Structure formats: C-alpha cells, structure tokens
Image (cartoon, rainbow, N blue to C red):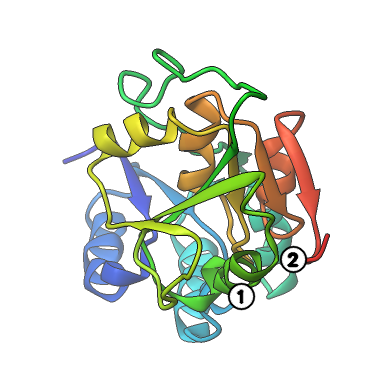
Amino acid sequence: KADVVLFNANPGFLHEALKKIYNLKSLNRDSILIMRLAGPIIMARGSGAHYDNVICRINEQVSDGVVFQSEWSKKNFKLIGFKNNHFERTITNAPDPLIFNNTGKIAFSRKRKIRLVASSWSDNWRKGFDIYQRMDELLDFEKYSMTFIGNSPVNFKNIRQIEPLSSQKLADELKTHDIYITASINETCSNSLIEALHCGLPAVVRNDGGHPEIVGKGGLCFNSAEE
C-alpha cells in the first residue's frame, strides 16, 4: 500500500527482497521505488558479481530512482554496466549526532604522545590490515601511541587492541585520540571514517575508494605504509 519504498540494496537480503520488489510494481504501478546503493559488491569483497548483476537488472526494470553513497560508487557502478537512471543523487552516510560529536573531545597536546586510532567491525584484510601490520612495525612508538578498535586478523605487537564497542563507547574512545587512520580499500562511504570525523578527529586516509571525497579538508591521503 506504500506510495514510496526506499530499498537498501544490501546483498545480505537482496534475493529475499526480489519477489517483494517485483510484486510491488505489479500490484501498484504508481508506487515509487528508490534504490540505495553502497559500492559494487565485487570491488568490496573480491567476489559476488552476481549481486551486482541483480542490482543492475533492478535498476533497469523497476527502480524509479537511485541514491549512491558516494561519487566513487556511482562512477564504478557505471563502469560495470549500470545504466543511467532518470533520477540519481549522491547522498553520503551520516552518524547519529547525539552520539558521534566532539563534545568532551580530549584536546591535542604536544606534551604527550600523539594518539592514533583505527577501527573496523570486519576482520577482512581489505579493511586495511596490510597497512596496520606495517604500522605496527614502522611507527616510532616513542612519539606515537596507536589503538585499534574492533575485529582483527592480526595480533599486533605494539598497537593496543580493543574489542568491538557499542556506538556510545566507541564515540567516547575516539574522543580520547588525536588522529584517525583508515587504510581500507574499495570502501564506498566508510561509516567508521565518518564517525571519527564527527568526533572531531582529523583523518589520514588511504587514497582509495570514497575516502578522499569524504575526508575533504578534514585530513590527508596516503598511498603506502612507508608514506
């Protein structure tokens, strides 16, 4: 009975939702279906091209409009054959401002070590663990301290590790640091990066995916661990 349906094209329930989507259009031709996309699954996971093919077909057959999470996502979907939709917009993600804000942020000080922090819910190597592993070896830990929050396939020697935290506890922990690091690859619109920026941390980001457009003037890009 809905006039407008916003469909978040998450691969976790994509096939389950297909029948509902097509039934919606067959039962109510006047309904409006807006599809919201992250990035191509094949780029994020290194597999799952069939999901991208399904998304392309939905766009061609039933979607009235598309919301991309970043211009990087839009560009790379078009490269794999995603056809132009009459109505397209890029709208980046945003965190809960009641949780992720700079209230109570610990001030930077040159009288102590510079505190770096990275975070990831996923322990997929594509989340940047090649860089974090090298940082664990290369950083001057007399000058810096570094914390990793979340799940990791690496047991760090020098980087402090914290298990995954609730949103509020994550925000509180971020605010005790000075600079956020993210080294993930092919990431459309990193929620972790956006959360850190909203907590008042400048960010040093891998020059990849949607990171450069999201960080804007709020940080710097790098291309290698040594850099």
Q: Quadrant of residue 95?
A: top left
Comparing 169 with 122, the one in front is: 169
Give the alpha-carbon distance from disc 2 to disc 1, as whole Å: 8 Å
- Label 2: few (<14), some (14–19) or many (≥20) C-alpha neighbours in 10 Å: some
The vertical placement of 219 against 73, above or below, is: above
Tag 1 or tag 2, which sits nearer the N-term?
1
Q: Amino acid at mark 1?
A: Asp
Q: Is residue 71 visible?
A: no
Q: Amino acid at mark 2?
A: Ala
Residue lying furthest left: 1
- Give the x, y percent position of residue 59: 52, 62
In the rendered view, does 223 fall on the left or right side of 177? right
- Label 1: few (<14), some (14–19) or many (≥20) C-alpha neighbours in 10 Å: some
Q: Image point 29% across, 70% down: which residue?
A: 12
Which residue has dot 1 on it?
130
Which numbered disc covers residue 82? none
Comparing 189 with 219, the one in front is: 219
- Give the x, y percent position of residue 147: 46, 51
The vertical placement of 211 against 57, above or below, is: above
Which residue has dot 2 on it?
225
Q: Image point 80% across, 65% down: which residue?
A: 226
Q: Would you say the residues marked 2 and 1 are in contact, meaning their CB atoms lie under 8 Å apart?
A: yes
Dot 2 falls on a residue whose secondary structure is loop
Comparing 146 with 23, the one in front is: 146
In the rendered view, does 196 fall on the left or right side of 6? right
- Give the x, y percent position of residue 13: 26, 68
Comparing 8 with 126, the one in front is: 126
Quarter of the image with the N terminus in it: top left
